[in-house]
DNA sequence: CATGAATGAGCATTCATTCAT
DNA sequence: CATGAATGAATGCTCATTCAT
């Protein structure tokens, strides 16, 4: 059974979907410029992943996007606004996907599997976006709104853990700690795949999911 | 029982202890200059963690270390040599600590606990060093020797997992995957502490260790 | 009579006129930016002559040209590219002038006078450019193309000497040696004027020409 | 017959021999340090010729000389003092040699041959020193004393020309101009050898001497 | 909207010189 | 005398941002 708090959290997250990456955009683009903004974001994603934020020059992004350097400043107030828009866009995408597929009435074990599966799907379909979001340290340039989005996904994870603990199937520990442990394990596996230190196919991801569930699950002979 | 391969790996790691962070230092310092080199390394560690490699200017490091900008180039050939010396120094320190306390004849469960305990001790005693080593993407500026050191610690972890699998106490999956999953979980927990998203004391670390063991352990009823 | 080899050389030189100093320029400038590029080249010429290549700082060139330091790098890839563009521009100018006024069908004595006159005109009209081209040691920063241009002018001189030797009016010695001797004498005279060690007007240049012809000419009684 | 003026000039030059390259030296060295000073000068000569004055770092000179960087400042007040000492040393050496072998009572033709021969000998025996003295533009760092030494050799040359004109064997032109023309021709030939643009052996030098004499000589049918 | 030339502060690095030992 | 660590101003060059077109 779902706790009230969890339900409320989920609602709050749904509301936050309103925040698009246009929040920090200099102007509201007309349809025909959409392609240019998208081209900029796509180029920026690749370059930020390849060389990092500080290692990527704005004119390089412009070149890769096929636009002039000045054009970037029509769509984004600054380099920092660009990286935040990127971060927000993809963080919302993954958050939305997780939530959309979350089986609110299923058992925690199935919910866990669903979350893991959704993150796997996202990381497989958008490896650069996943690398950008989770494999980099976004030290100082993320703004409050970006950090809030990140926190909201973690809140969701922690709420799920708390709920599962109420159901008695997850270890009675700090839910935040367990949530971070699970995310850490997932990221560890995906980073190993990204950095080609391990061969990780769908089957391996499913097995890793079962193993990670074991980490937080209550075991008969614990 | 310990496999031969595992023993050999451990020996190779012991040999690699010879490499000090003076390997990539421009000049061999005399005793009285040691303080200056240490001051540079300490300042660089803090700043690289705070702002990242590309986000930190060499003159900033010099200021923080209380030396002139040019002095850094008496001790390190370049900014890249400095960050590699730093990386190597701390990676060796943690590798050495793990190995020194590794109970080669104990059961895998105790070995796992020892590794986790040593990493916890290191991360608690040197939080900045741990953040530097594990929370950053060390993209393009790490050299082969630094990468080798990182790989050697992962080899050790994978060898441990393989050995534990031979003993039948760890799940029969790709040992590299399990190793990365465990490291990821550990880093996740420590990152949560570093970024103040969770209160993680020694007790919590011990509990997290038990949970993470569950992730890779074979369980009676699955 | 003109030797075939000489004719061919002259043709090759004519072809090389295609190479403008924009060859090594970072971007192709639009008409209105021409002034800035020219301002940079003019300032660089003066400063390189006054203080030498290594003795001139790029920001000094920028100041003298009335542009920002960074602007230089819009027009030239590097300081070395700038000095090569400068060298090439003026070397081509003088080479072109010599060739354009070369009386291919005249007697060697008149050809010699024409070459000398053209070099004199150039050195008088562009004293800084001549000083830059001939009074400096262009050690390590000249690239192959620049060296090729220099060589091509010397080839032309040597070919002229060889041709004049065939006509029996020039001493039967290594034509390259005679050519270098003549160029050296010319540079010596012009350097004396540049460094104000002698008063050298047009009349003096004409007399010096006659004297230098005597150096290579066959004399009745030796 | 030798003019009085010429004799007096020669005397003044002889006096100037007193100025050794120790004039601008920080301390008067004791015998055992002579080697170090010499080592510094030898290393500096080579490096200044190879890379130019501004292109050579003082610590590089120290390295090449096998001394510490600070040691150079025991012998020379500054980098400029070092290059001036070097210039003076070699300029005096060549001046002394020319004068020592100058046949004061011989005919101008023989005197000319003697000067040329002495310069050839010097340039052959000390190619780096000759390259340093004559093939480089010593723009801004030569001090008055160095310039005076250079001027005194040119004065000698001009006086010789004037004397030969009195004897009626040299063209009646500005003697300074003829002197510069002759030096220029000589330098042109030697530069061609130094830069390997022509094969110049002793025989070629003798022939070049005869040619250069023709440049300034009065010819029957001029 | 879009451009890209222009800016100038900031970067990593060098190097002439000093000075404590 | 001799050293070489230390300095810090200066160098060649980059790059986020602006703005005239």
Image (cartoon, coloured by chain):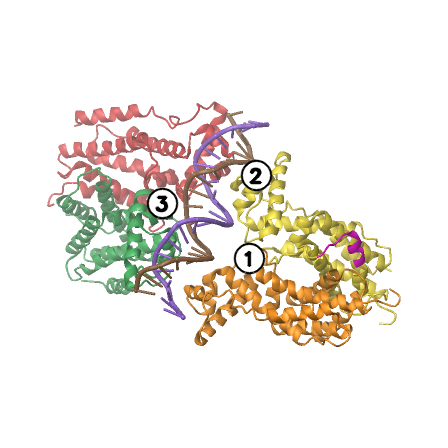
Chain colours: A red, B green, C yellow, D orange, E brown, F purple
Q: D27 or A105, which is in the foreground?
A: D27
- Front residue of this view, candidates B97 and B218: B97
For the stretch drawn in magenta, the main secondary structure is helix
Q: Quadrant of residue B194?
A: top left
Contact? badges 2 and 3 (CB < 8 Å): no
Left or right: where does residue D13 sit relative to residue D66? right
What segment is highlighted magenta in the picture? Answer: C198-207
The chain letter under disc 2 is C
Left or right, C105 with reference to A83: right
Q: Furthest-left residue in view?
A: A221
Q: Mark 1 — residue?
A: D141
Between circles 2 and 3, the one closer to the viewer is: 2
Mark 2, secondary structure of its residue: loop
Determine crowd level at label 1: few under 14, some 14-19, many 20+ residues with C-alpha closer than 10 A: some
Q: CA distance from mark 1 to mark 3?
A: 39 Å
**C200 drawn magenta:** yes
Task: Using the numbered discs, state the Cα–Cα distance from disc 2 to disc 1 in whole angstroms.
Answer: 27 Å
1 vs 3, front mark: 1
Q: Give D109 or A92, whichever is nearer the viewer.
A: D109
Position of the C terminus of chain B by quadrant: top left
Mark number, residue C66: 2
Alpha carbon distance from label 2 to label 3: 32 Å
Above or below, A35 relative to B219 = above
**Residue depicted at x 55% and y 61%:** D51
Give the vertical position of A140 relative to B12 (above or below).
above
Per the image, label 1 sits on a secondary structure element best described as: loop
Question: At 30% from the left edge and 49% from the top edge, which residue is drawn?
Answer: B43
Q: Which residue bears the numbered disc 3?
A: B56
Residues packed near mark 2 inside 10 Å, few (<14), some (14 to 19) or many (20 plus): few
Give the quarter of the image for residue A108. Answer: top left
* Same chain, labels 2 and 1: no
Q: Which chain is mark 3 on?
A: B
């Amino acid at each position: 059974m779902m706790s009230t708090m969890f339900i409320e959290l989920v609602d709050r997250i749904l509301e936050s979907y309103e925040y698009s990456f246009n929040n920090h955009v200099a102007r509201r683009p007309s349809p025909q410029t959409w392609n240019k903004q998208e081209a900029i974001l796509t180029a920026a994603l690749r370059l930020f992943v390849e060389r990092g934020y500080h290692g990527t020059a704005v004119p390089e992004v412009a070149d890769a996007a096929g636009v002039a350097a000045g054009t970037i400043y029509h769509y984004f107030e600054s380099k920092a606004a660009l990286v935040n828009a990127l971060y927000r866009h993809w963080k919302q995408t993954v958050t939305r996907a997780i939530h959309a597929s979350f089986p609110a009435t299923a058992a925690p074990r199935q919910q866990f599997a669903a979350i893991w599966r959704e993150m796997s799907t996202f990381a497989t379909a958008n490896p650069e976006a996943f690398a950008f979001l989770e494999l980099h340290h976004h030290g100082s340039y993320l703004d409050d709104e970006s950090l809030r989005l990140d926190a909201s996904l973690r809140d969701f994870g922690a709420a799920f853990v708390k709920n599962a603990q109420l159901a008695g199937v997850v270890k009675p520990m700090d839910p935040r700690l367990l949530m971070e442990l699970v995310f850490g394990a997932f990221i560890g596996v995906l980073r190993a795949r990204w950095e080609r230190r391990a061969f990780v196919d769908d089957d391996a991801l499913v097995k890793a999911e079962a193993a990670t569930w074991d980490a937080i699950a209550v075991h008969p002979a614990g």
